[in-house]
Image (cartoon, rainbow, N blue to C red):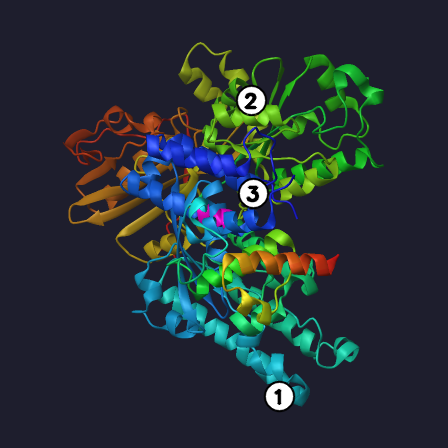
Amino acid sequence: MSNSISNSTPAEHNPSNLRAEVDKLIAEGAFDLSARRLAELWRRDPASGTASFVTSRLEELREKTRDKLGNTLALTKFKLAILRSFTVEPIVPLLRAEAFAYGIDLEVHVGDFNTFVQDMLDSQSTLYRFAPNAVVLAVRADQAAPELWRDFADLAPEVAQQAAERVVRGYEQWIGAFRKHSQAALIIHSLERPSSPSLGVLDDQSEAGQSGLIRQINRELRRITAGFHGVYVLDYDALVARHGSEHWHDERKWLTARLPIAASHLLHMAREWMHFIVPLSGRTAKVLVVDLDNTLWGGVIGEDGMTGIKVGSEYPGAAYQALHRALLDLSRKGILLAVCSKNNLDDAMEALEKHPGMLLRPKHFAAVRINWTDKAQNLREIAQELNVGIDALAFLDDNPFEREQVRAALPEVTVIDLGKNPLEYASAVRNCAAFERLTLSSEDQQRTEIYAAQKQRAGAEQNFQSKEDFFRFLEQEAELEPVSNLTLARIAQLTQKTNQFNLTTRRYTEPQIAEMAKQPEWHIFSIRVRDRFGDHGLVGVAITHDEGEQCEVDTFLLSCRVIGRTVETALLAHLAESAAQRGRKRLVGWFLPTKKNAPARDFYPQHGFERQEANGTGSLWAMDLKSSTLRSPDWIKLKVATSLRHGN
Amino acid sequence: MPASTLEQVRNIASDIFGIPVEKITAESSPETIENWDSMQHLNLVLAMEEKFGVQLDPEDIEQMKNIGAVAALVEKLQSAAR
């Protein structure tokens, strides 16, 4: 199975030269470049030995940069604990190398064999002291449901049923205890079905057989996890099936080293974990920029013409339609699509608009660059047009030369490697963890439409003499609402991914928001905005914290597609008003500068706040609520939802 | 001419034990390589299986007394599979 990030790329360097080059660059102090070469080595040769090399050099880089890996190499730190019933140690270097290729500096804690129950129940356990961001519960059916696994043939049907129910109750208790002690994400392996059930084919003639009961446990697991924020199921049974149970397992290693997974599949286990770690760490791509010739269709439109290019329901065009379907699936998850192609605009647009084999049409693309300019420059422009950072882009192109050029010019971009065979293109996209999402808001599903409306707004704005006339024309409506179960996931998502108009850039998980919502002195608001062009959806979050006479703004953020339209003023005015109603005298808030939040820098002074103090991390601003003249602009129709005590 | 099995095994051992390939010879063994403990032994076995597409039996694994023996074992298993 090919992973998008790790297919081989042609380059002059062979792996052993790359190793020498990495060491030379580290010795010379060229840490950025050495890290890039290290990632290249991993992409070209993702094997166990390479993983050991990559992790050891990563440690060296960490030491040399005085543990400032995050700052110097722009890596995101993430702590993962693995609770397990089998040997996972050989998987850890593969996992850390793979994480590194996604821009994540992964620290891993492995629990003792089969102590996962104690670890989860005991608030003083090494698990909780490690303070993980996420925990994997990698427990196999032979441990989680030993009676069903080993002695099934001896069990009377009702006893087997009771055993299955006991297993489910166990999980329910462990998860409940875990949530009491930790707000980390929890990823639970589903149980695999036996490849040879005790009763052979007879087993599958009833739902009460060995496989049937394990399926029942897995269904119940999904029901339980759905009741918790930040608890997810990893379908281990499906993972094993995908690779073939006979190939996945290695009985010799299981019996001698308690390692059930064959050497050639350890990487697949690591990659499956990455599909959770990448979205949890926020290193996701928001936009996929695609090439056209030999990527979305076979052939070159400028040479082969409409009748010559290959795309349709029959081979070889079917391979490209399979890719189109994968892209449409991304679009449904809220990932924007964009085109970047070296072509004559008219030729390419004709194919996009009219070719009968195309499943993708111009309306599916939020930005289009069809020209002869350098692709890195086009990618910069696309990021700017869509108001996202360069690191939010992913790039899909069949041409290795273009891919290498983008990697060199814009190392932050997720570049997806494609092999020579178009039949593998769709799975290269589907296997890229940067496109994984663990929750989906209605905003995500409508994102392409939202951006289309945004283009219309930008067009309309140019017809107005003054900003104010434009704002009146827009007929904006803002709906303010305390956090509820319906908005909690979206609120957490916005705190995790909003970079530009974000005053403090504090990242919160769903469980953390849920916990905050229970505290009476904390208030969490969301803001939803619509105007004559359409609904922006839930685009802003404010979190405040009352203390004595003052109310402190902990978090204040807006999606950049609504900033500059005075919605931010409306939200701040509401915070001031509700703080005053609760008897607070002052509204205060920090501005914590980052590389990306310059658009929010002057927000407090522009709204009449005075600077109180400044230190190395930021500045504190305050406003006296009694003398405040802060009002919501009269061109915004403001609706404030009745304040149910939130979190209940 | 592709790299010999011994050379490939030395390269993998260099990655796994974290020592330069020049310092690894056919005679290198757990006695001469400090890092060569039971967990690293398992890692070495897994890396061999992955790289050469062979499967080692527990009896084979016991025979992996030094790097030369590992290379010989891999060659034996590969020719048996042909």
Q: Which chain carries label 2?
A: A
Identify the residue under disc 1.
A159
x, y percent for residue A226 = 53, 61
From the viewer's perspective, tell me whether residue A604 is left or right of residue A378. left
Residue under disc 2 on the same chain as residue under disc 3: yes
Figure check: A422 above or below B59: above
Residue visible at 53% across and 69% down?
B62
Mark whose residue sits in front, 2 or 1: 1
x, y percent for residue A621 = 20, 33
- Residue type at mark 3 is Asp
From the viewer's perspective, tell me whether residue A606 is left or right of residue A432. left
Return the disc, 3 or 1, that comes first in the chain's sequence.
3
Residue visible at 35% across and 40% down?
A61
Identify the residue under disc 2.
A455
- What is the quadrant of residue A620 in the picture? top left
Circle 2 Cα neighbour tier, 10 Å, few/some/many (<14 / 14–19 / ≥20): some
Nearer to the camera, A414 or A215: A414
- Residue type at mark 2 is Lys
- Residue type at mark 1 is Val
Nearer to the camera, A21 or A344: A21
Nearer to the camera, B15 or A639: B15
Spatial CA distance of label 2 from label 1 is 63 Å
x, y percent for residue A507 = 36, 45
Return the disc, 2 or 3, that comes first in the chain's sequence.
3
Residue A489 seen in the current view = no
Return the disc, 2 or 1, that comes first in the chain's sequence.
1
Identify the residue under disc 3.
A45
Circle 1 Cα neighbour tier, 10 Å, few/some/many (<14 / 14–19 / ≥20): some
Q: Give the range drawn in magenta.
A: A49-53
